[in-house]
Image (cartoon, rainbow, N blue to C red):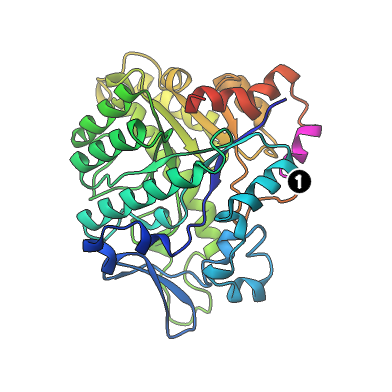
Amino acid sequence: MKICDADSHAVEPMSIWQEYVEPKYRAGAPRFIIDENNIERLVIGDTVMAPGPFPIGGVGTPGGLTDPVAARSTTYAKAYPGGWDAAIRLKDMDAEGIATTVIYTSIGLFFGGDEEPKLTAALCRAYNNWIADFCKQAPDRFFAVALVPLMDVEAAVIEARRAMEQLGLRGVMLRPNPYAGRPMHDPAYDPFWREMQGLGAMVGIHEGAVGNIPFAGAERCKKHPGVENPGFLSFAMSHIVCHPHEQQLAAMQLICGGVLEKFPTLKVAFMESGCGWLPYWLHRLDEHLEALPSFMPALKMAPSDYFRRQCWIATEGEEADLASVLRFVGDDRVVWASDYPHFDCKLPGSLAWCKHAELPESVLEKVIYKNAAALYGF
């Protein structure tokens, strides 16, 4: 069977922010400083990004946060080189039997918060140009999605069109969090959804658990007197919470807020949050439409039916309830992703789950390739 990794990541070389960013904006491009606790911190513009308890290099390395000593010593420059070296990435793909991979950003997960919109737009253009060049090194195996500055909807529309039509990218990535304080179903976004629908390109909703953009659990990660840990939630608990909860919020807004009714061929995928939450959440949305129809006047069918018509979700493959998710939403709505080369990527052996997944061969073939091909338009 052919295999597609529907969500891997670049770990962008820091040099690209000087080589690809327009000269006017280079002073505000991403860079690192060392804080008073000797922790590497990312700075964008004048904003020091919200810290973690470790340098972010460990995040860009398979298993990089497992060992506490390595987690605190792996700087960004020491992250796993498969994040930016095409030859190493291809070697890893061959070892895993992966035919194609779809690449998402790492540094771009920090965009969308306090930085200046025109700077963010310039950084998105720079990243999109770089990742398009990166993919040219193996154009039949590397595909990528673009970044857009959604806090400026007009600029996001322009950049999405350029990325799809001129650079050949396969969709855009959005954080599920509020941009400029707006929820995803805010009518201000309608021109962007209309453009993506017209382009026939997918929107990948992808949480990051980083940066200065509001995300679930972050407000509970403040230090408290007399408490030794970083706050009410540790990094582990914050990461556990924000990925599925922010995706649940995004799915609710896009469906119950009428976006998918208004744009019936818009393609949306929910990445890197697991898939086990989906049946419960869609059932809950369906029940609320039945009980509170006057509060969702835009909907003309059940929320779960909108998902089955227009949405996909990524699984890591080892999830115990994968088979029940496939039964609930359909076996053409789930894709597989490794999260390569981030800390939770299992390398080697990312596809070991296939041997005991107990899925019919025709279904497994869809999950590990055909569904991604439909989503990204291979």
Q: Position of residue 158 (x, y in %)?
A: 23, 37
* Extent of the magenta region: 349-356
Q: Which residue is mark 1?
A: 349
Residue most toward the front?
Answer: 137
Please tell me which residue is depicted at 45% across the width and 23% down the height of the picture.
Answer: 307
Q: Nearer the viewer, residue 172 or 139?
A: 139
Q: Nearer the viewer, residue 209 or 232?
A: 209
Q: Position of residue 316 (x, y in %)?
A: 63, 40
Does residue 83 belong to the magenta stretch?
A: no
Is 263 placed above or below 341 here? above
Q: Determine whether, in the image, residue 242 is placed left or right of residue 61.
A: left
Please tell me which residue is depicted at 53% across the width and 79% down the height of the picture.
Answer: 228
Does residue 352 belong to the magenta stretch?
A: yes
Regarding residue 292, the answer to whether it shows in the image is: no
- Which amino acid lies under the numbered mark 1 shown in the image of this protein? Gly
Alpha-carbon neighbours of circle 1 within 10 Å: few (<14), some, or many (≥20)?
few
